Image (cartoon, grey):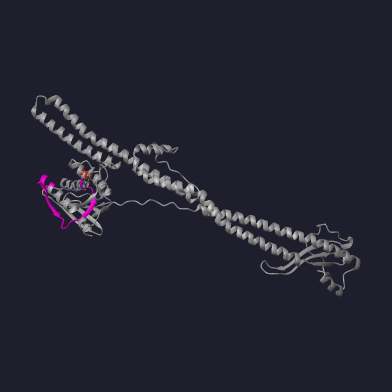
Amino acid sequence: MAAQTTTPQEPAAVQSSISMRLNARLFLRMLGIFLGIDLLVCLLSLGCMAVWAESRAAGIAQLVTDRGIPTEEAAVWAQTGGYEVYALEREPQGWGGTVNLGAKWPEDAGTSLRSFQFDMSLLGPVHEARYIVELSGGGAPYAIALDISGPASIWLFALRILLLCELAALIIGIFQNAGLVKKSLRPLQDLATAASKLSSAAHDMSPEELRRLTGALDQINATHLDARIQVSGSQREVQSLAAAINAMLDRINEAYSSQMRFVSDASHELRTPIAVIQGYANLLDRWGKDDPDTRQEAIDAIRAEADSMKALIEQLLFLARGDNDAVHFEEKPLNLSALATEVVRESDMIDDVHTFELTAPEPVWVSGDEGLLKQCLRILTDNSLKYSPDGGKVTLTVASGGGNARISVQDEGQGIPEESLSHVFERFYRTDESRTRQTGGTGLGLAIAKWIAERHKGHFELLSRVGLGTRFTLVLPLIPSPKEENAE
Ligand code: ADP
């Protein structure tokens, strides 16, 4: 056995990530600027300290030239003045041998090399900060070490304040930028949402509206509906916008093609009866004037073809109105069991070669249009009669359960081949078997039944086996009995 069920589709959601990327970029840019400022401040501070220490060291060097390197006792006194002078037992080391920071060094001081000596951390106190100038001193190298912990403490304090301000600016910046980026991206998001909405709306458009809409997009027109937007890069908003437009184009393309197919199938179906009528009109013209039998045969055939053409045109009109949502729909509570009883009674009156069975033990209530639901049941019952051999039994069963009302029409007929199960609800679809047998069907009955089911928020379940029979079950939302509702 094979079964087929129709289900509705869910729209896709639009997502966001470009704001995060822009935020991260703005944050990194601010961080870079702040680090640059910090580096500049540090270099400037060190430069100032070096200039100040250099002029002091030059004065001390002059003293050394005049009086020589201080004795141990004098060195202790010098330490209280914030500097130290001591002899070196090695060659001078450091940087800036050719640098002149504006100090006046004595002539015999020789080459002077500098270095900083720090013992401090960003969060702790300044333990030691010294500016050391090592001089060759004409053969007797010595060093002048200046205590710069005072200026270094001020510099560290200023650096801490600067870093705190920068941190605060970065944190505030994150929130401010997020708001700003979100605001500037809103039009893009709105566009994506609008395109998504358009995508679902496009499903209900007429070919003319579709062509007008598609004509608005450059390059893409009714003859090139298969063109699609290509997006490179990884920005999700732009990709979702392109995906929304492409999905819309897919649906427009599908709707447009199915409309075109419908028009061409309808013309094809109408061509056959017109050709038959033309043939019989010619026959009448040539021989029917004198021969009463030929005349009657032509009249009967023309009448039969006109009848089937009328039925086809009525079905086409129904589907066209259905597509435009222009079918009259009067909703009220309906008892499916009563409806099934009525359909069985009417079918039994016009068909005496099949037998009917009805199983409707209790009232089953649904909300819907009586005329449309009856038309739907008639389509199913007529098919069962058309595709069952004489003497076959057609069973209608009404039941309820799981919040649904179910009405099934089952026959013991030819059945539907498995490969045709997914197509029988398509417009103008007929199985090969029913085509060759010339049942007089148009292939539109089940398309109309499906439209009616969907209009009532229901669907079909189909079970069929070739040679054994077919069961169509219409599933509709169940409603409480109106009597029970009134009693409450
Ligand atoms: P038609 O006017 O040709 O009956 P429908 O849309 O009602 O058009 O049905 C589409 C096709 O589905 C039919 O041509 C037939 O091949 C198949 N079909 C529908 N109902 C039955 C059935 N009860 N038993 C066998 N085949 C069926």
Q: Residue furthest right?
A: 66
User: Would residue 448 be seen by someone viewing this image from the given angle?
Assistant: yes
Q: Is residue 413 left or right of residue 240?
A: left
Boundaries of the magenta span: 346-371
Residue 2 horizontal side relative to residue 94, left or right: left
Q: Quadrant of the N terminus?
A: bottom left
Residue 372 screen position, x and y as percent: 22, 46
User: Which of the 4 image quadrants contains residue 117?
Assistant: bottom right
Q: In this view of the protein, which residue sits in the foreground, 26 or 308?
A: 26
Is 131 drawn above or below residue 302 in the view shown? below
Pinpoint residue 317: horizontal percent, then vertical percent.
25, 38
**In the image, residue 195 above or below residue 483:** above
Q: Farthest residue toward the left?
A: 292
Residue 484 is situated, as x and y percent measured from the top left of the image, at 21, 58
Quadrant in the picture for the C terminus: bottom left
Figure check: 239 above or below 137:
above
Residue 369 is covered by the magenta coloring: yes
